[in-house]
Amino acid sequence: MAEAAGIQVWCEDEAGPYQTVPYAGYSWRPEQQPACQPHEYVRNGTAKLLTLFHPSSGQVRVKGVTDSTNATLHDWLKAQLTTILADQPLEMPPASDKATNRLAWERWREGVAVKATLPEVLPCLRLLLVMDNLVGHKNPEWLCWCFARGILPIFTPLAGSWLNMAESIQRLLKRRALNGTYPRTTNDIIYQLEAVARVWNRQPTPFIWAGKRHARRTRAHLKRHPVGASAATTPRPVCRRDAKWQGANQMTH
């Protein structure tokens, strides 16, 4: 709905930590010569992946880091979001439309568990940023920066991080980059993850919420069973015993 209304929707998440250990998985090897992983390895730090994902186009922006503190994450997000919105000018609503503009912001915040107080002066909404419900994402300085640029962070509910599509793309990138490999350093992990993201962006796949899998679930949930030879259906099959009871009941009455 937001994309159709001209409002971009991006998802943000941090994946990891990824350790310098052998990762199970498939790899291309000559026949009868499987890759062997050592049973001993050195823990040489961990790496994380900062991710911005645009489901409508399938484009992903990533950065490999060794820490994901607020300073690291917010600085990267500010730079990326500024680039994303560079082609979409920041507009202030006319004085007569200020109330309507505020209602538009509030509309997208309905049902959100944590709500920050919106400033009095709000620009036109340009981007929705889906984020996990973490304390660091609700930093006042970060929220004020977003509001001033027409960005509305939306936090997923507790135990509902699966609603964030960045989680899905991160699983794909991790599997393609690390499965079947043994990175020795954090730089190896970062290089492999970022390289896979660059290849993905050459031919990205859009993510559609309520796609084919959702349609199959809906059909299964709404499945109807025919009753006799008529066009009537029931949400559950009428067994033979029930049919006999219904006939006997009708004869009694």
Image: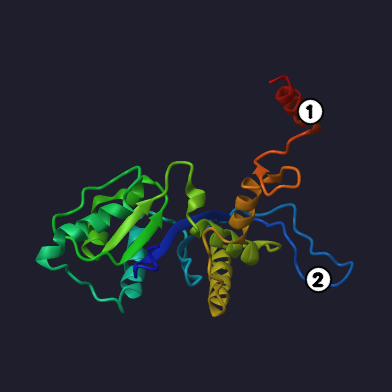
The answer to whether residue 213 is seen in the rendering is yes
Left or right of 53, for residue 253:
right
Q: Secondary structure at mark 2?
A: loop
Report the mark closest to the observer, 1 or 2. Answer: 1
Residue assigned mark 1: 244
- Most foreground residue, 220 or 101: 220
Q: Is residue 108 left or right of residue 24?
A: left
Q: Is residue 227 above or below residue 9?
A: above
Mark 1 surroundings within 10 Å by alpha-carbon count, few (fewer than 14), some (14 through 19), many (20 or more): few
What whole-number distance in Å separates the C-alpha atoms at marks 1 and 2?
64 Å
**Residue at position x 40%, y 62% in the image:** 1
Q: Which one is earlier in the sequence, the residue at label 1 or at label 2?
A: 2
The image quadrant that residue 12 belongs to is bottom left
Nearer to me, 240 or 190: 240
Residue type for callout 1: Lys
Which image quarter: residue 97? bottom left
Q: The disc labelled 2 sits on which kind of residue? A: Arg
Q: Which residue in the protein does label 2 denote?
A: 29
The residue sitting at the top extreme is 252
The picture places residue 173, in percent across and down from the top left corner, at 58, 65
Q: Residue at x 39, y 68 (%)?
A: 4
Which is more toward the observer, 69 or 211?
211
The reply, left or right, for residue 30 in relation to residue 46 is right
Secondary element type, mark 1:
helix
